[in-house]
């Protein structure tokens, strides 16, 4: 079952975007308040984040973009042209708000769903002078992202964002994917990671007794699940991120200058049902030596 799910992953995500187009995810307008490395930017250039209440969708959308835009503005202030590589761009929910917020920004963005990339390119704000959108599967060994980006006029990224993407990557491929993305960064660049933490509501639902639950644990070693639509989801512990992913980065050529990993807990409200929803996310920032 695991091999079949992984083999059909791209097709399953294509069906997801065919069904939902650009209506499923809200635009992501978040991020500075979450990452200590970006706080000096968030207070002056981006604006403060909201509180810890609201719907869980609002929490995600309010927090993600500020994280990325804060780091981009920090890069821009050092007189370098900010270049973002957004991995798993979906239909552009983070891309287009960022283009409005960060002057001069150039963006490489990719997704392994061809339908999602088509939707990105159909957006009225799509401009090939600022956006290089393409289909890419991180798990396939060829072509490499390095080869895809080589020679492109935007150049290498100053920032790589990996937002709710690594959880869809098979556990055995996660370290290799992370190392390859970090290697693409310009000196002094930053890799930003945010994803589902172990114990998040989304994981608990897999084990609930509600009739819509879809419990399908794919691994006895990892918190790795198959959803009802065939897509997959991994839930990260802080120990795994620090001890496996972070250690791999630290040991790969000694290029990590700084690292921050933490679990973030949020309480949202389902107003229709009148209940609190406890969410747990994990996030990390790894900065490359200049």
Image (cartoon, helix red, strand yellow):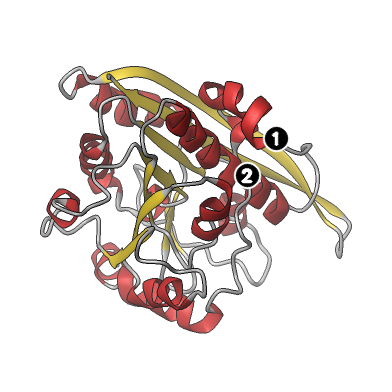
Residue 33, relative to residue 253: is it above or below? below
Instruction: Determine the CA span between mark 2 and mark 1.
Output: 10 Å
- Label annotation for residue 30: 2
On the rendered structure, is 65 left or right of 104? right
- Count of labels in the image: 2
Q: What residue sits 86% from the left and 65% below the top?
A: 272
Of the pair 218 and 94, the residue shown nearer to us: 94
Q: What residue sits 56% from the left and 30% below the top?
A: 263
- Label annotation for residue 47: 1
- Crowding near pointer 1: few (<14 within 10 Å), some, many (20+)? few
Q: What residue sits 67% from the left and 26% below the top?
A: 43
On the rendered structure, is 210 left or right of 4? right
x, y percentage for residue 280?
61, 40
Residue 121, relative to residue 254: is it above or below? below
- Crowding near pointer 2: few (<14 within 10 Å), some, many (20+)? many
Of the pair 270 and 259, the residue shown nearer to us: 259
Residue 22: quarter of image: bottom right
Q: Secondary structure at mark 2?
A: loop
């Amino acid at each position: 079952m695991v091999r079949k799910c992984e083999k059909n992953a791209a097709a399953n995500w294509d069906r997801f975007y065919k069904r939902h187009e650009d209506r499923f995810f809200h635009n992501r307008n978040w991020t500075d308040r979450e990452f200590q490395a970006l706080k000096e930017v968030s207070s002056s250039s981006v604006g403060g984040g909201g509180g810890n209440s609201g719907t869980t969708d609002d929490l995600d959308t309010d927090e993600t973009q500020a994280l990325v835009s804060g780091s981009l503005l920090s890069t821009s202030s050092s007189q370098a042209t900010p270049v973002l590589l957004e991995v798993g761009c979906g239909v552009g929910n983070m891309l287009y708000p960022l283009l409005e917020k960060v002057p001069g920004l150039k963006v490489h963005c990719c997704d392994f769903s061809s339908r999602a990339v088509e939707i990105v390119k159909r957006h009225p704000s799509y401009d090939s002078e600022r956006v290089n959108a393409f289909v890419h599967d991180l798990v396939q060994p060829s072509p490499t992202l390095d080869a895809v980006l080589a020679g492109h006029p935007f150049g290498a990224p100053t920032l790589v964002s990996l937002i709710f993407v690594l959880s869809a990557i098979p556990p055995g491929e996660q370290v290799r994917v992370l190392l390859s993305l970090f290697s693409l960064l310009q000196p002094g660049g930053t890799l930003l990671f945010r994803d589902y933490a172990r114990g998040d509501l989304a994981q608990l639902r897999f084990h609930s007794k509600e009739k819509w639950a879809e419990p399908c644990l794919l691994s006895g070693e990892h918190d790795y699940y198959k959803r009802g639509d065939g897509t997959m989801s991994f839930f990260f512990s802080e120990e795994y991120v620090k001890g496996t992913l972070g250690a791999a980065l630290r040991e790969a050529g000694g290029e990590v200058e700084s690292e921050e990993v933490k679990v973030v807990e949020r309480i949202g409200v389902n107003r229709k049902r009148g209940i609190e929803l406890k969410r747990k996310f994990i996030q990390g920032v790894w900065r490359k030596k200049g």
